[in-house]
Amino acid sequence: MSSEYEKNVVKLIQEKLDELDYLKKAKDWDKSKVQRLANDIETLEALFENYNLGMNYFRRAKGGRSGLRE
């Protein structure tokens, strides 16, 4: 099960990875731009992982508290 958020973050990560590969293959690549892209990829991966960890808790807990309200 994946949400629109997850799909879009994965899409952004892939776009950044493609751009990073392109830059590394270029003859005169800018080191600062490559570093910035690497930082962007790391940030997006952290966002994706944190979202999944948080959502897994709620996805598993569905109905788990229903007995408390009886």
Image (cartoon, helix red, strand yellow):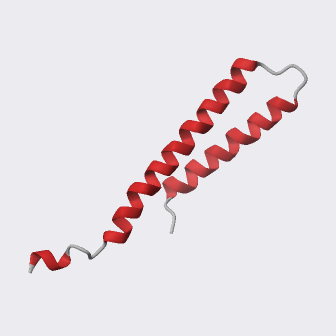
Closest to the observer: 5 or 66? 66
Q: Quadrant of the C terminus?
A: bottom left
Q: Give residue 50's position: percent from left, percent from top.
A: 45, 49
**Above or below, comparing residue 31 to residue 37 in the picture:** above
Residue 43 located left or right of residue 17: left
Where is 62 relative to 6, above or below? below
The image quadrant that residue 53 belongs to is bottom left
> Where is residue 42, by image quadrant?
top right
Horizontally, is 70 left or right of 1 in the view?
A: left
Q: How many marks?
A: 0
Q: Is residue 52 left or right of residue 26?
A: left
Give the residue displayed 56% in from the left and 44% down from the top: 45
Q: Position of residue 61 (x, y in %)?
A: 31, 70
The front one of 57 and 20 is 57
The residue furthest left is 70
Residue 32 point in image, percent of width and height: 69, 18
Residue ID at (10%, 76%)? 69
Q: Residue at x 91, y 23 (%)?
A: 27
* Residue 58 placement, left or right of 18: left
Residue 5 in the image: x percent, y percent?
49, 53
Task: Depth check: give the residue in front, 24 or 3.
Answer: 24
Image point 67% across, 25% down: which residue?
A: 35
Question: As displayed, is residue 16 above or below residue 28?
Answer: below
